[in-house]
Image: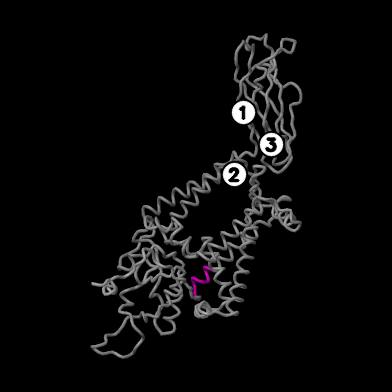
Amino acid sequence: MNLKDLAPAFQEQSLFEVQQKIYPRAVHGWFAAWRWALVWATQIAYYGGAWLSWNDRQAILFDIAHRKFYLLGLVFWPQDIIYLSVLLIVSALSLFLFTAVAGRLWCGYACPQTVYTEIFLWIERKIEGDRNARIKLDKESSLKRVGLKTAKHFAWIVLSLWTGFTFVGYFTPIRELVVETRNFSLGPWESFWCLFYGFATYGNAGWMREQVCKYMCPYARFQSAMFDKDTLIITYDQVRGEPRGPLSNKYSPEQPKTGDCVDCGICVQACPTGIDIRKGLQYECIGCAACIDGCNQVMDKVGKPQGLIRYATTHAMEGKPTRVVRPRVAIYGLILSGIILSAGASLAVRIPLKVDVIRDRGAMARDVGDGEVENVYQLQIMNTTEQRRVYEISVEGLEDIHVAGPARVEVPGATSQRAPVKVRVHAEREHAAPGSHPIVFTVRAVGAERERVREKSVFMVR
C-alpha cells in the first residue's frame, strides 16, 4: 500500500497553540470611567512626583549614591531598612485583603501592566481606529498601513522613553537629568536604565500585553487560593442568560424562547485577555470589568435590564447570603491595621539622630598626667533632619569622668559626621580600678531636647 493513500488519516498537530492577536474593543460605562480615573491618578502621581520640591530639594528621591532616601519631609538612611520591610509587608497584606473581599482589583485597575496597556491601546485607537478598523488594517499591504503603524510605534516609543526617564529621575535628581540630557552628558548608568525601563514599557504594554498577565505574572496562578464563595468576582448569570440566541419576539414549541444573552460576543471582544467570561471564572480574568460595561451597553440597546454580567459572589449567584466580614478578612484586616498603626507610631516617635560609638583600638588607655587616664573614641553622629544641628556630648558611668576638649559638634542637615572624643578619669580613685568599666555617652541636640540618644561603651583603665 502506498503511504500517499494513507495521507488523509495523518494530521499534523502542533504542541503549542499559535497565539492569536487580540483586538480589544473600546467600551464605555461605569467601570471604564473608574479605570480611566485610576489611570489619570497613577500617572499624575508617577510623572508629577519626580518634579515635586521640598526644602529646596526633590521631594521623592532615592539617592543610592549617597545612601539617603527622601520622602517629603522624611529622610531615611540604610539603618532605616525596617521601614522598607514594613512597606512591603503592608503592600502584600493589602493585596491579600482586597483580593479576598473583591477579587483582582489591583490587576484590573491599578497594576502598571494594566494601566500602560490601557494607555497604549488608547494611542492605538486614536491612530489606527476602532477594533474593526484595526483588524482590517492588519490585513492590508499599503503605504497607509506603514504610515499608521510608524506613527503608532513612534508615539509608543516617545511615551516609553519618557516613562524610563521619569523612573531614573527618582534615583538621580530629575532636573539634573534634564540638564545632562540636553548637554549630551548623561552618565552610562542613567542612559542604560532609561533605555532599559523604556524598552520594558514598550515591550510589555505595546507587544506582550495580555501575555504578561497570562504567563509571566505569578499572581494569576495563586489568586484562587485567596478566593472563596464570598469573594466578589465577575460572573455571568447563566440562569438569566441561557439559552443564548439572537433577539426574537417569535416563540414556538420548536423554537423555545431564548435567554437574555443575545450571543453578540461583545464581552469577548472587550476583554483585554480575550476570554469568554460566560464559560465561568478563569485565571486569565484580570477583573477589569470591561465585559460588564460592554454587556450593559447591549442590554440597554435591546431593552433588557443590566447586570447579565456583573460583580457578584458565588453565594449570591446561588441565592445564599454573602458574608463580607469572615475569618480570613478579619485576620487580614487586624494584622494590617496593627502593622500600619505600629509603623505610624514608630515614625511619630522616631528620633532623627543616630549615634555609633567606636573605641580607638590603637590605644586602649594612656596616662596623660595628673593621675588621669584617657580613652579616645570616635562618635559617628548622623543628623537625619534637614536642619543644621549642634550636638552636645556628655559621658557618665564613673565618678569625675568627663569629656576633655570640645564637647560640642556641629553637623549639617541630612549628614553623617565622625567626631573624635577624648574621655578622661582620675585613675587614682577607688572607683577606677584597672580593667574595663561601663560608661554611657549622651548626645543631645542643643535647642531640641527631644533629639537625645544614649549609647553604651566601656572605659579601659590600666
Residue where numbered disc 2 is placed: 348
Q: Is residue 30 magenta?
A: yes
Q: Is residue 308 magenta?
A: no
Residue at 69 percent across and 14 percent down: it is 366
Q: Amino acid at mark 2?
A: Ala
Front residue of 205/326: it is: 205
As drawn, the label of residue 455 is 1
How far apart in space, not on screen, are marks 3 and 2 (Cα)? 22 Å
What segment is highlighted magenta in the picture? 28-35
Prevailing secondary structure of the magenta residues:
helix
Colouring scheme applied when the structure was drawn: one colour
Disc 1: CA contacts within 10 A as few (<14), some (14-19) or many (>=20): some
In the figure, 234 relative to 167: above or below?
A: below
Element marked by disc 1:
strand
- Give the percent coordinates (x, y) of residue 251: 28, 89
Q: Amino acid at mark 1?
A: Glu
- Give the percent coordinates (x, y) of residue 27: 49, 76
Residue where numbered disc 3 is placed: 416
- Give the percent coordinates (x, y) of residue 161: 63, 61
